[in-house]
């Protein structure tokens, strides 16, 4: 029973960490229509910022001055937000698939920088010894994970509440207006370029927060944690859950992560050992199949966007 509870806590921590990143993507794509295919890059920025600020490499950067966990979280969000500003100023003039290609290329570049900047990132070996704040609050691993889960739940709830306030406010309605018809929104006196950039930066900050929490929980970071498959997973979570709906984004993260982890266990049990190396590809194929089925049978996701139709509209 303890083993099952421990696994469920571990599962929910990672599902909600990814859920925060999905909420960021939902703000960009679901509400603003920005096709960001570089999610892994912003997760990497947040993760490495947390590792550098609070981990062992801080001696090389800050002369051994130890920074608390909260500063690491804020620094990770700030670094991802700064990256979002720089990248957004360059790429947000692009639209649709052109923006997707540009952001995907930037994410790959970020991963290569992490791979080759050994002095700061540890290169292929990564960075270890990243402190987990729960280790100071409890000694038993189960208690530590339970405390970390409570913290992640609180942060997810805070992010959800904040985003709901944003998207239900007039600014959120402007986001949808820009998504549907940018020229019409501009004709009403709005500044689409500034609003798109603001939405993009806020989404990147949430992705940075997700990357920081992931690294703090695992206690290790390497460039191989942020391969393009992560972007594919985050997008699948959003599409399956339902874009332009924050509850759907969180639900999609939980459902897809359950399928990913569950399929990994099943494959490990039924696939012969000599073919275990291909298990990751099998999981990717399964997630791709789920994505296709979702688009065919539930194109708006499990909890899609609420459509507001006037009662006087003709059917």
Image: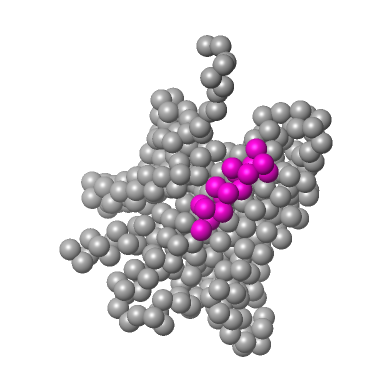
Q: Relative to residue 68, is residue 188 depicted above or below?
A: above
Please give left or right for residue 297 compared with residue 172 in the image: left
Q: Residue furthest front?
A: 312
Quick one: quadrant of the N terminus?
Answer: bottom left
Residue 162 image offset from top left, x and y in percent:
56, 54
Q: Is residue 170 magenta?
A: yes
Res 294 → quadrant: top left
Viewer-proximal residue among 60 and 95: 95
Q: Residue furthest bottom?
A: 64
Q: Which residues are magenta?
A: 158-173
Which residue occupies 65% across, 75% down?
119
Q: Is residue 245 visible?
A: yes
Viewer-proximal residue among 166 and 212: 166
Which residue occupies 57% across, 15% down?
313
Q: Is residue 122 visible?
A: no
Which residue occupies 54% across, 38% down?
244
Residue 44 image offset from top left, x and y in percent:
58, 60
Q: How is the image coloured?
A: one colour
Q: Relative to residue 306, is residue 156 depicted above or below?
A: below
* Numbered circles on residues, count: 0
Viewer-proximal residue among 65 and 269: 65
């Amino acid at each position: 029973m303890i083993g099952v509870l421990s696994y469920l806590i571990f599962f929910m921590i990672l599902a909600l960490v990814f859920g925060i990143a999905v909420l960021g993507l939902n703000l960009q794509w679901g509400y603003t229509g920005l096709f960001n295919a570089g999610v892994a890059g912003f997760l990497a920025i947040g993760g490495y910022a947390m590792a550098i600020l609070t981990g062992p490499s801080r001696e090389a950067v800050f002369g051994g001055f130890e920074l608390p966990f909260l500063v690491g979280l804020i620094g990770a969000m700030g670094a991802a937000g700064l990256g979002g500003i720089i990248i957004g100023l360059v790429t947000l003039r692009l639209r649709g698939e052109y923006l997707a290609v540009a952001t995907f290329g930037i994410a790959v570049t970020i991963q290569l920088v992490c791979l080759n900047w050994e002095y700061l990132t540890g290169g292929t070996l990564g960075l270890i010894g990243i402190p987990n704040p729960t280790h100071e609050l409890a000694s038993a691993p189960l208690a530590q994970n339970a405390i970390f889960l409570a913290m992640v739940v609180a942060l997810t709830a805070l992010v959800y509440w904040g985003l709901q306030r944003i998207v239900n406010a007039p600014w959120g309605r402007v986001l949808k207006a820009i998504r549907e018809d940018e020229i019409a929104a501009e004709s009403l006196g709005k500044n689409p370029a500034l609003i798109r950039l603001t939405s993009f930066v806020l989404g990147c900050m949430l992705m940075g927060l997700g990357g920081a929490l992931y690294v703090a929980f695992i206690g290790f970071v390497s460039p191989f944690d942020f391969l393009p498959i992560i972007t594919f997973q985050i997008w699948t979570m959003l599409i399956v859950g339902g874009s332009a709906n924050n509850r759907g984004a969180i639900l999609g993260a939980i459902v897809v992560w359950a399928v990913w982890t569950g399929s990994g266990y099943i494959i490990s049990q039924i696939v012969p050992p000599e073919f275990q190396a291909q298990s990751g590809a099998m999981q990717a194929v399964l997630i791709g199949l789920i994505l296709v089925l979702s688009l065919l049978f539930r194109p708006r996701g499990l909890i899609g966007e609420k459509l507001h139709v006037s009662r006087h509209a003709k059917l």
